[in-house]
Amino acid sequence: MGINSNTWSTIRLVLILGLAGFLYAFSSLRNGRRSLQKTEVVFVGESNSFMRQETVNKLLIENKSDLRSITKEQLNLDKLESSVNKNPMVEKSEVYVSVDGVLRAEVVQRTPVARVMVGETSYYLDKNGKQMPLSNHYTARVPLLTGSITDEVMPKLTAVMAMMQKDPFLKKNIISVRVLNDKSLEMASRNHPFVIEFGQLVHPERKFLNYKAFFQKAVKDSTLEKYKRINLRFIHQVVCTR
């Protein structure tokens, strides 16, 4: 009894799939045994340089002196990524090997919104409201934050500081923020002697709009240097004291 065409088609399909599977497995094995060619660190997003590429490189090669002695199959990418993410300057990272043998790490650094000073202790506050150590390589241009900084005010306080960092005018103009015991804020301007009474941590968008409108008019009238206090506590008006 001969083999019909349908049977031959099935046999051919099985052979083709088997050959494809063998070639794929062989290719994967060869690829896994290839040595790494180099490492590459890419800092994604903001241009802050709180850490150096050399720091990440050491984490990637796990202190091995000869990169070419490391093969792809020896790598535990999840472990390497976890190691990079443990660095206090890192928000998140992705570690992978390219087809040409480059061990690459794409790193997003944390974003500070203030520099906190409590007694002799100083650290950054990041955009998520978490403490972040100072860096030996880079100093962020963020406002100094002092005063009664408690866990209770931290969420709203972080939101206000982040709002200031996103606004070019506020980022340039306001250099320090002090939290008073009643949870209200006082701010200092970079080039002007007056105190900005921000008030409680409510309606920050409106208060900042009022401040910018006041500032623009005062510049036009050449009256900025005449004021001692700028009160933003009332969302429908700005009260100035000479």
Image (cartoon, rainbow, N blue to C red):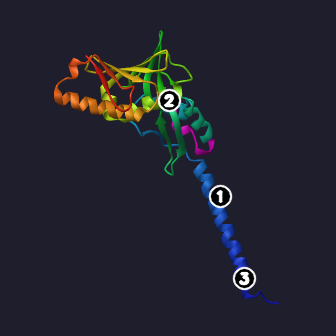
Q: Which numbered disc, 1 or 2, marks the residue that appears first in the sequence?
A: 1
The residue that appears at 63% across and 52% down in the rendered structure is 29
Q: For this rendering, which residue is in front, 105 or 181?
A: 181
Q: Residue furthest right?
A: 1
Disc assigned to residue 156: 2
The residue that appears at 23% across and 32% down in the rendered structure is 216
Contact between labelled residues 3 and 1, with CB atoms less than 8 Å apart: no
Q: For this rendering, which residue is in front, 91 or 151?
A: 151
Tag nearer the camera, 1 or 2 = 2
Magenta-colored span: 65-75
Label 1 – label 3 distance at C-alpha: 26 Å
Label 2 sits on a secondary structure element that is helix
Q: Would you name the residue on which mark 1 appears?
A: 25
Q: Quadrant of the N terminus?
A: bottom right
Tag nearer the camera, 2 or 3 = 2
Q: For this rendering, which residue is in front, 99 or 227?
A: 227
Q: Is residue 70 magenta?
A: yes
Percent position of residue 197, x then y: 37, 21
Amino acid of disc 2: Lys
Q: For this rendering, which residue is in front, 52 or 8?
A: 52
Q: Is residue 52 magenta?
A: no
Report the side of 95 relative to 7 (left or right): left
Amino acid of disc 3: Trp
Label 2 – label 3 distance at C-alpha: 72 Å
Q: Which numbered disc, 2 or 3, marks the residue that appears first in the sequence?
A: 3
Disc assigned to residue 8: 3
